[in-house]
Image: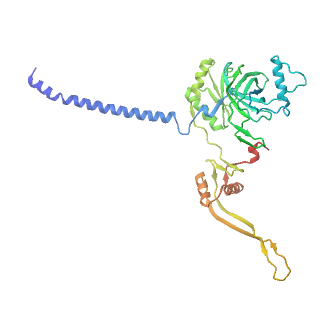
């Protein structure tokens, strides 16, 4: 080999590997950048803006809880039980219980109880609950017991709407309230001492068939009926599965063809309920609470061109009686003469113009600019609705509706 060529190769050698290293480094940096961009794009596709999971939008038909109710006795109270002279059913229940345990109470004998209270028991039986599982129960006094603190619930059956026993309740009652009374009739109460809970106080005895695996299709019921959301839900499921297996039946229900095997159906639902779907926009509504004066305006509310003038009329009536003294030697008497002052004040009266297509922010900003109160805002919205300028549904929540009265 020529020494000169060898020297040249050795001289040029250090520069060649350096060029290759820098080129590889640049290629690696470009690859990392591409990976980061791809992951960000994937995140944007996987978690779209305003999207919600299927489990937050809908429930599976047939998968629901079932209410249970029962009757029982709470014993061991510290003198705060039912007054048996006013609650005869407590004594009757105790006699029946003692009779079942082999203790016979003589006829005509009514025990004067202080430590026993008749209670109603209710619980929710979850979907797919199996025998042997424990559920929480709530215990509430039926008679005039002052407090259930320190009491224990004796074994009591919990029945469903069909009259069958689905659980057995028993245990110590946990009461969050406190009640203290004096001999003079005074009483101090914190929260509600006549009701309590028994955590894991009932044992499930019977299975409720849910119908989840009884048919070939799975029906998803939307929490809020909406045609747009139902259509988007079916489209999203078909896009995820790659097949036309989902179809909307109405504004609430979407039917999905699922696997027949129970294990495969559970895995199918685990994948389906985590799918992200963008729900449709809610109906434009204005919610008014007449009792508290709360006004909630939805984002879809729009106002047509209108001019609004609103003022406040205040009437003040004050009574200022005056004492009238008689003239000297007039044989008159001192008298009190009523005097009434009536003052009428009208404030406000400002006018503002709403352009067509005004949004929620513009409407609130315009109302706040004139210093309107929630009551004034209700009057303005009602006037706009009557004028045909408010494109929204008005929902009035009255005190009677909140309390359940018609």
Quadrant assignment, res 37: top left
Say if 329 sits above or below 26 in the image: below
Residue positioned most to the front: 183
Residue 372 position in % (x across, y down): 64, 59
Residue 308 position in % (x across, y down): 65, 61
**Considering depth in this image, is 293 or 90 the residue closer to the camera?**
90
Q: As drawn, is 406 to the left or to the right of 274?
A: right
Residue positioned most to the left: 3
Quadrant assignment, res 322: bottom right
Residue sitting at x 69%, y 68%: 345
Residue positioned most to the bottom: 329
Residue sitting at x 72%, y 50%: 291
Q: Is residue 175 visible?
A: yes
**Considering depth in this image, is 308 or 287 the residue closer to the camera?**
287
Residue sitting at x 22%, y 28%: 17
Counting labels gives 0
**Considering depth in this image, is 295 or 93 the residue closer to the camera?**
93
Residue 373 position in % (x across, y down): 65, 57
Q: Give the colour scheme shown.
A: rainbow
Quadrant assignment, res 280: top right
Image quadrant containing the C terminus = top right
Q: As drawn, is 74 to the left or to the right of 28?
A: right
Q: As drawn, is 265 to the left or to the right of 315?
A: left
Image quadrant containing the N terminus = top left
Residue positioned most to the right: 108
Residue 354 position in % (x across, y down): 62, 58
Q: Is residue 126 visible?
A: no
């Amino acid at each position: 080999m020529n020494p000169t060529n060898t020297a040249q190769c050795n001289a040029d050698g250090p520069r060649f590997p350096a060029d290759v290293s820098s080129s590889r480094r640049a290629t690696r940096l470009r690859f990392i950048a591409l990976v980061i961009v791809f992951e960000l794009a994937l995140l944007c596709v996987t978690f779209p803006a305003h999207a919600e999971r299927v489990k937050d939008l809908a429930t599976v038909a047939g998968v629901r809880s079932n209410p249970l109710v029962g009757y029982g006795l709470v014993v061991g109270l510290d003198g705060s039980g039912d007054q048996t002279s006013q609650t005869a059913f407590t004594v009757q229940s105790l006699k029946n219980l003692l009779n079942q345990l082999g203790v016979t109470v003589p006829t005509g004998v009514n025990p004067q109880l202080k430590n026993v209270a008749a209670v109603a028991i209710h619980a929710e039986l979850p979907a797919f609950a199996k025998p042997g599982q424990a559920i929480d129960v709530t215990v509430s006094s039926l008679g005039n017991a002052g407090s259930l603190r320190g009491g224990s619930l004796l074994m009591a059956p919990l029945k469903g709407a069909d009259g069958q026993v689905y659980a057995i309740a028993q245990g110590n009652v946990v009461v969050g309230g406190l009640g203290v009374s004096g001999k003079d009739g005074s009483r101090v109460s914190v929260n509600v001492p006549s009701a309590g809970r028994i955590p894991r106080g009932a044992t499930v005895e019977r299975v409720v068939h849910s119908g989840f695996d009884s048919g070939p299709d799975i029906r998803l019921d939307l929490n809020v009926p909406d045609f747009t959301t139902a259509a988007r839900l079916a489209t999203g499921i078909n896009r995820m599965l790659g097949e036309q297996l989902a179809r909307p039946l109405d504004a609430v229900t979407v039917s999905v063809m699922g696997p027949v095997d129970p294990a495969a159906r559970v895995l199918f639902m685990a994948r389906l309920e985590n799918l992200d779907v963008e729900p449709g926009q809610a109906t434009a509504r204005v919610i008014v609470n007449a009792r508290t004066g709360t006004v909630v305006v939805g984002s879809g509310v729009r106002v047509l061109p209108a001019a609004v003038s609103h003022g406040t009329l205040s009437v003040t009536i004050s009574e200022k009686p005056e004492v009238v003294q008689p003239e000297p030697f007039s044989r008159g008497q001192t008298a009190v003469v009523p005097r009434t002052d009536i003052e009428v004040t009208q404030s406000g009266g400002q006018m503002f113009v709403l352009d067509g297509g005004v949004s929620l922010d513009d409407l609130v900003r315009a109302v706040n600019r004139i210093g309107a109160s929630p009551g004034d805002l209700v009057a303005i919205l009602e006037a706009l609705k009557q004028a045909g300028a408010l494109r929204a549904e008005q929902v009035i929540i009255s005190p009677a509706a909140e309390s359940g009265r018609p």
